[in-house]
Every structure is written in structure tokens, then in C-alpha cells.
Amino acid sequence: MGMAYQRRSAPAMARVRQKLSSEHIADVLGDTRERLIAAGLPKKIKPGGRIAITAGSRGIGGFVEILSGIIDAIRSGGGKPFIIPAMGSHGGATPEGQIEILRRLGVTDHTVDASIEATMETVDLGASKTGAHAHLDTIAAKADGIIVLGRTKTHPENAEGIASGLLKMTTVGLGKQIGAQEAHSHGLWESVAAVPELTLAKSNVLFGLAVVENAFRQPLVIEAVAGNHEAFAESDRRLLKVAQPHLAKLPFDDLDLLIVDELGKNISGTGMDLNVIGKWRISGGDKKPNYRRIVVLSLTHESLGNGLGIGLADFTTQRFMREYDHANTYINLLTSTEPDSQNPREGPPPLALVSDREAIEVALYSALTKDKPRVCRIKSTASLHEFWVSEALLPEVERNSNLTLLEKAAPMHFDGHDNLF
């Protein structure tokens, strides 16, 4: 028999659409192939040369199409393409786990018509300027060439300068678990800038392929980038400015409760993007935006049990905990912990309630809300074009020309187990 918690009834919720740019590339496969061919990739490939392509764990929009376009471009030059998982410590830091993450993202040897070759072993290329050693996947090191595929976007902890992009994929993706740990333990962003100087000088990276997404996670920009440090750094800085206007946020600075349907590594490095929920939840400081309580209902299938970021929530569900893998989460947590950081709180889960309804209502009670609670429900921090709001937020919706009311407020629909979906 479960424990009885004090609760406050969930409010009626209205569905709202946020106006976001939907500009995107129509033919992702064709655009990818043509950009690499135009940049001269076929001329850099010797007949029968084995070319490794990095595939990360975040789930780029059009992932299969982009990889297929790279594969087509390599074959047009007479090369033999293959995929390598490039995701640091994810997947429990095992080859099998990383292949399984790619499968859950839709990438298999059948969907991209190329083999997937995985290892956690690396070649140590020496110490960078920060002291962090540059590591390179041993399979990639033996290949005749490497294509680094990376999405350029704001990082949950870094929205300016160099963030997630080709340099980070070179450092952490190609560096595997040990490379990721080296970078984090010597200052992540300093190492992301320094380590690729060694990696790109001592390996056969032919090109980078940089992708910028819109707020719907559709490719907006695809660029072929020369395989050297200067070009990678220039691309990361320039395309981050292109990506920034497409970073969607919630149009509310003050909430009693944020309900998040899904948390996951395919959504953000911290499971929930700190640019959406507030960086203060890790680093302290001004509570902007001030979301007093966050409840997370489920963990994405693509995360393979890695629930990093759940510690940023205040409540979760037993449904989440059934998918949560302590080992996979803590390998990632300990790999990414920096020496001067506070005691990491992204991993340990908060109180897990029996059902979605109980988690929401206990969280609402704990927020000590007024008569009309300010509540917003989102699918994830990467999906903010539609969301649900309580009646207390409707006046703000009506005043905001970027918001449209799609459905009037109605009670939440819970199933027979008191879950939302």
C-alpha cells in the first residue's frame, strides 16, 4: 500500500501554439551529398579507402538522411563508408550500448546501408595546451579518412563562443569515454578549444559536416567544413550565431509548476535544456526563469536508461524509475564532472510518485501556490512549439502575438492508471 501524500488537484489546461520559424532544408540527403561533393570530398578519397563517419547520441533531425547523404558522397569517390558511434561515455561506455543507442535513433546497417563499427579503445595523441590528452577512436585512427558530423547549437551550459559543434564532437565523440573524461577534468570548454588542435593535426579528418536545426529539430543549414582546427573553430563560432535565434524558450518567466513529459540524452546533455529551465538549477544565482517546481514524467527510449538530469527535477514517477539505469547514468555523470564543480546533482533522482497524477498533484501542493496556480506542461525542452497552460496563464497568452490558443482549458485526461500517456 502506497504512502498518502498531501496533494492539490491538477488544474484544467489549455493547449497553446508558439510561433516559431519552420524554415528548413527540404531534401536533406541530397543537400548533404552535394555539399560534400562540391567541397571536393571525392578527390580526397583513394579507391577503396575506408572512411569513418561519426554518429552521436543526440539524435540530429534527419539523422538517417544526413548519414545516407555522407555515405553517398563517399561512394561517389570510390570510398567504402562505415559508421562509428561518437558519444563519449553514453550507452554505459560499452560498444554494444553505443550501437544500441544508434539503433534507437533509427541508425542501423540497414537504414543507412553501411556497417557500424564500435570500440571504446583509443589512441593517445598526447597532451593539449590544457593538459587534457587528445584521444582518438582506434577504428577511426586506422581508417583512410574520417568525416566528423556535428550539430552546432547552444549547449545547456554554454550559449556563446564555442558550444556544441564540430570541435566538441572531435574532442568528446572521437575521444570516447576517456577523451570525454580528460576534457571535463581539465575544463571542458578550454579543452574543447585545445584538444582538436592535436586530434586534427594527427589524424586524417577529411571534412566536418556541420548542421544547424530549427526549433522543430529540422535541418536548417548543412555545411561541409575543411578538416582542420581553424576551419572547425570558425564554423562553430559562426554557426552558433545562426543557431541562437532558433533556440526556443517558454514565454513565461514565472511558474509554480513545469510538467515535463520526457527527459533524455537525445533531448539535451542535461536531459532538460538549462537554457529553458534555468541555469540556476545547477549553478545557483538569479532564479531566471523561476519555475518553482519541476516534475518529470518519463525517460526517453533513446536514452538507454541514462537519466542524467533527473536530479534537476523536484519530483518524478515510478514509470520513469522503471526505465532509469543507475550504472549508465553514473558512468556519464562521473565522466562529465569537472574538478571544481559542486557536488553533481544531475544524477540522483528525486521523490518518485506512483502515477503522473500523484506526481503532478504532490508537486503542485509543495509549490505552495495561490488560488490560481501557474502551470505549464511541455513534451520536452526540445519541443516547445505547442504546450499546455493553466487558466492563470491565459491572460499572458492573449497578450502575446506569438501565441495562439488551440484548445480551451479542460481537465487533464488521465488513464486507468492515473497516467497522462
Image (cartoon, rainbow, N blue to C red):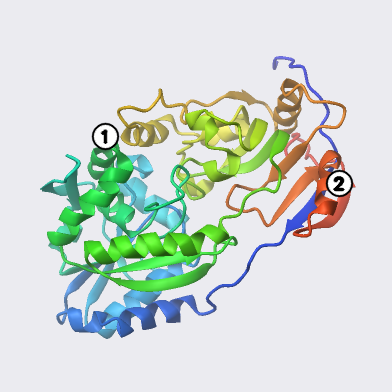
Can you give x and y, in whole percent of width and height, for residue 339 in the image? 30, 28
- Nearer mark to the viewer, of 2 and 1: 2
Left or right, residue 255 beside residue 144: right
Residue name at image x 14 percent, y 80 percent: 46
Q: Quadrant of the N terminus?
A: top right
Left or right, residue 375 beside residue 100: right
Can you give x and y, in whole percent of width and height, for residue 306 in the image? 45, 39
* Placement of 178 over or under 113, stated as above or below: above
User: Which label's residue is closer to the chain start, 2 or 1?
Assistant: 1
**Residue 75, located in which quarter of the rendered image?**
bottom left
Q: Can residue 228 be seen by looking at this rendering?
A: yes
Circle 1: residue type: Ser
Label 2 CA crowd tier, 10 Å (few <14, some 14–19, many 20+):
few
* Mark-to-mark CA distance, 2 and 1: 47 Å
* Placement of 212 over or under 330, stated as above or below: below
Can you give x and y, in whole percent of width and height, for residue 365 in the image? 76, 22
Question: Element at badge 2?
Answer: helix
Can you give x and y, in whole percent of width and height, for residue 40 in the image? 25, 82
Q: Can residue 63 be seen by looking at this rendering?
A: no
Q: Quadrant of the C terminus?
A: top right
**Residue 411, located in which quarter of the rendered image?**
top right
Question: Element at badge 1?
Answer: helix
- Where does label 1 land, which residue? 185
Asked if disc 2 and disc 1 are in contact, CB closer than 8 Å, the reply is no
Which disc number belongs to residue 395? 2
* Placement of 57 over or under 365, stated as above or below: below
Left or right, residue 165 beside residue 353: left
Circle 2: residue type: Pro
